[in-house]
Image (spheres, grey):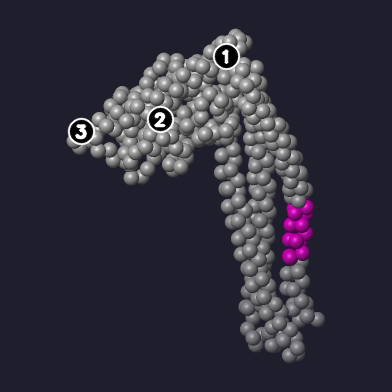
């Protein structure tokens, strides 16, 4: 009877360890499942809210396009600004809701990581228990095992028991490896979510800037026009003249500079082998090349991209070249034009401060001025839409899409 107990006890003890660990882990799992379930519900609520916001945004976008397609008058412009303000506020809410949703997903992944940590610890303890039992059995010689077992069947059963323990360890190790692999995958997913969250926070700050810009734009329009349709039409004509004059000057001055350089020995322009760099840190494009939604498309086609940039951001030359013009127009439209090699030229509009002079040679990355665009400030021009950089790329005198040349 004693021999049977000695043989059976390790098996019973091992089973008790496993069952106790499984019971404890099962209770933890139930608690975590309830927490994860609540997080999943909160995530779905955020997704539903985002969908409703997107539906509202679509309504405002439709109203903006409708007004942009109508006659250019003060009432329509104010309606556009009102709708843009409402949409900007929704953009902020949408970005904040996305941040909240992503934060919840991070919480969920953290719970899953804790769960995997507990599973790994439990599995390690289980393996350690099995190894200790094996060591107890390994301390006995084959002769001792034969003497302790009254029959050959008992001996065979004990050997089978040892084989089962070996198999148990092998299976536990495989499970442990899978847990570790799952954990690494969840940690990688967590890092991705954290990067996404950082991007969303930057996006949110940009949208807050957009909202302020829209509010300032509306205040500026009302201040300048005093609700007078006649005054608004005068401002439209002034903005159109500014752009037409800038276009005329840019075309003629590029030709003059290239002709002048061709006559000077050793003044052949070389283009940067690496291509262009961004004139301001890469950021949101607020208006695209020939953008159909450009607010003043009924006055002129948009020959550039508008890049979001805070008022007074450093402006850098995208490639080396000669300054064809650095026009300081006071409160009017100020801009810089640089002529490069390979037929390229670039234009930087709404410049609030200019660091360079006409005919000066600049190198790629050199600070050439500060950005502007805030209504009513130096270099902004008439009817500007807020702080940004108006950036043109011209090839052989013709405006082309800058995004095709920027990295």
Q: Are marks 1 and 2 in contact (CB under 8 Å)?
A: no
Which residue range is magenta in the image?
A: 17-31
Residue 232 is labelled as: 1
Principal SS element in the magenta part? helix
Q: Residue at x 58, y 43 (%)?
A: 196
> Which quadrant does the N terminus fall into?
bottom right
Residue 347 is labelled as: 2
Label 1 to label 2: alpha-carbon separation: 28 Å
- Label 3 crowd (10 A; few <14 / some 14-19 / many >=20): few
Label 3 to label 2: alpha-carbon separation: 24 Å
**What residue does disc 3 label?**
264
Residue 150 picture quarter: bottom right
At mark 1, the secondary structure is: helix
Residue 109 visible in the current orientation: yes
Q: Are marks 3 and 2 in contact (CB under 8 Å)?
A: no
How many discs mark residues in the rendered view?
3
Residue farthest along the left direction in this orientation = 265
At mark 2, the secondary structure is: strand
Residue 276 picture quarter: top left
Q: Residue at x 18, y 35 (%)?
A: 265
N-terminal of the two: label 3 or label 2? Answer: 3
Does the magenta segment cover residue 362? Answer: no
x, y (%) of residue 302?
A: 50, 30
x, y (%) of residue 53?
A: 71, 34
N-terminal of the two: label 1 or label 2? Answer: 1
111 left or right of 20? left
Closer to the camera, 293 or 274? 293
Residue 89 visible in the current orientation: no
x, y (%) of residue 7?
A: 74, 78
């Amino acid at each position: 009877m004693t021999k049977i107990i000695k043989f059976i006890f390790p098996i019973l003890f091992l089973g008790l360890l496993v069952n106790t660990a499984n019971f404890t882990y099962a209770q933890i799992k139930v608690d975590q499942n309830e927490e994860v379930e609540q997080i999943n519900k909160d995530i779905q609520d955020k997704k539903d809210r985002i969908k409703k916001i997107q539906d509202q945004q679509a309504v405002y976008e439709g109203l903006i396009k409708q007004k942009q397609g109508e006659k250019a008058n003060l009432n329509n412009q104010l309606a556009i600004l009102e709708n843009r303000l409402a949409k900007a506020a929704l953009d902020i809410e949408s970005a904040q809701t996305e941040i909240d949703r992503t934060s919840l997903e991070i919480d969920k992944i953290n719970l899953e990581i804790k769960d995997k940590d507990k599973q790994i610890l439990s599995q390690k303890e289980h393996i350690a228990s099995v190894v200790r039992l094996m060591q107890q059995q390994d301390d006995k010689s084959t002769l001792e095992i034969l003497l302790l077992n009254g029959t050959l069947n008992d001996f065979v059963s004990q050997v089978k028991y040892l084989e089962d323990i070996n198999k148990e360890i092998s299976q536990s190790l495989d499970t442990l490896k899978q847990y570790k692999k799952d954990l690494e995958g969840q940690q990688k997913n967590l890092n991705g979510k954290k990067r996404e969250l950082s991007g969303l926070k930057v996006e949110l700050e940009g949208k807050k800037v957009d909202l302020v810009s829209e509010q300032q734009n509306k205040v500026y329009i009302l201040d300048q026009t005093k609700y007078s349709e006649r005054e608004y039409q005068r401002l439209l004509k002034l903005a159109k003249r500014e752009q037409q004059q800038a276009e005329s000057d840019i075309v003629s001055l590029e030709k003059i500079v290239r002709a002048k350089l061709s006559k000077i020995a050793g003044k052949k322009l070389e283009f940067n082998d690496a291509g262009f760099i961004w004139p301001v840190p890469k950021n949101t494009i607020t208006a695209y090349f020939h953008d159909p939604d450009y607010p003043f498309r009924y006055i002129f086609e948009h020959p550039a991209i508008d890049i979001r940039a805070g008022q007074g951001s450093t402006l850098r030359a995208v490639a080396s070249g000669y300054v064809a013009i650095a026009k300081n127009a006071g409160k009017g439209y100020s801009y810089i034009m640089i002529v490069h090699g390979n037929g390229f030229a670039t234009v930087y509009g709404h410049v609030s401060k200019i660091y360079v002079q006409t005919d000066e040679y600049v190198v790629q990355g050199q600070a050439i001025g500060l950005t502007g665009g805030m209504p009513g400030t130096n270099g902004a021009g008439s009817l500007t839409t807020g702080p940004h950089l108006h950036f043109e790329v011209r090839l052989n005198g013709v405006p082309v899409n800058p995004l095709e040349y920027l990295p």
